[in-house]
Every structure is written in structure tokens, then in C-alpha cells.
Amino acid sequence: MNVAFLQSIALEKTLPCLAEPGKIIVVGKPSRRLDDVLPYLATLPNVIAYNPQAQAVTLRRQPGLITLGPKRVSITQVKDSEEGLELLATLVEAINATWEHRGELVAANRPRHAPRPLEVWALLPQTNCGRCGEATCMAFAFSIMQQRGQLEACEILAHEEAFADRRVALQTMLG
């Protein structure tokens, strides 16, 4: 019988979420340090940043972010404490599943950063056609980075074969 890596993440406190007024940030304390599992969590597809020196992993969730450190977890843009407790319980399951499958993963050992808007913009058609709903391709890049826009909203990128390689590169970059 496998023993779980992590038993629980206790709700430590809630804070107002500045990114989304009316929502909260949930801060939790894991039942054990997460140092050993963080390099494996950093290999997940929704990771947007990993700092091995600071031992911090940030994952994208819809909406908001999850940041894990050795002794603390925070989740942004949470509706209320009840949803926060559910998310913390789900996070325990995800951490345990990652740990259980660590033999199939290659632990990350290098920093990873979120794509920057200029990196996204460089792969867009740069026509400033506005069909995506934004005035410019740069504005569209920012909307994607802020999770307000979807890559599929760019009709040129989505439908023109000449941009297929850029579409794949962006999908990979953005997870």
C-alpha cells in the first residue's frame, strides 16, 4: 500500500484579491514540506514559472494562479473560503498523484518563466486586423497573457495554414 506524500493543506488565512475585487486569496499550510515534490510539479503543463533557488512553482488555473513553496500554498481569485477548502483538497490529490508518478517524470532543475507579451506578439500575424476583438496584435497578446482572450480568437492564426507552425508554437508556449 502506498502512503500519500501529503496528508492535507490547512487553510491558514484568506486575503482580499487585488486582481479580482470581491474574490479572495487562499493561503494554506501543507502538512509537510513540499521541497521534494516541487521539481516534479514544475514539469506539469500548466506551470508558468519555476524558481529552483527560491523553491517556488506557479501554475495557471482558470481563473487565477496557484503558487507553491516548501511551507506555503496560495491560490488567487477564489470565490469564498468554501471554494478555497475544495481547491486545497484537490491540490493535495494533485500533489500526491504527481509524487506517485515521479518515476515517470524528469524533475525540473532549471528556472522556467511565463511567456512575455512580446514573445507572444512575435508569433502573432501582426496584421492589427481587429477581428479578435482587440485593436492591435500587441493588445491581443496582453489579453492572452491576462487570460481574458483565447488564442482561437485570432482568425488568421486559427485558419491560415501559413501560420500553422506559429499556432503550434504558441499553444506549446502557453500550455
Image (tube, rainbow, N blue to C red):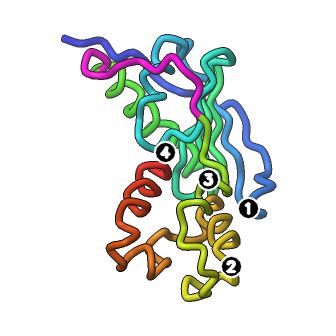
Q: Nearer the viewer, mark 1 or mark 3?
A: 3
Question: In the depicted view, which residue is nearer to us: 92 or 51?
Answer: 51
In this picture, which residue range is highlighted in magenta? 102-112
| Residue identifier under label 3 | 119
Instruction: Find numbered disc 1 in the image and state the secondary structure of the residue it sits on.
Output: loop
Mark 2 or mark 1, which has the lower sequence index?
Answer: 1
Q: How many marks?
A: 4
Q: Position of residue 100 (x, y in %)?
A: 29, 20
Residue beneath disc 1: 20
Classify mark 3: helix, strand or loop: helix
Q: Which mark is residue 63?
A: none
Circle on res. 86: 4
Q: What x and y, as percent, mark residue 42?
A: 48, 28
- Helix, strand or loop status at disc 2: loop
> Which residue was labeled with disc 2?
136
Asked if the residues shown at circle 4 and circle 3 are in contact, with their CB atoms under 8 angstroms apart, the answer is no
Camera-nearest label, 4 or 3: 3
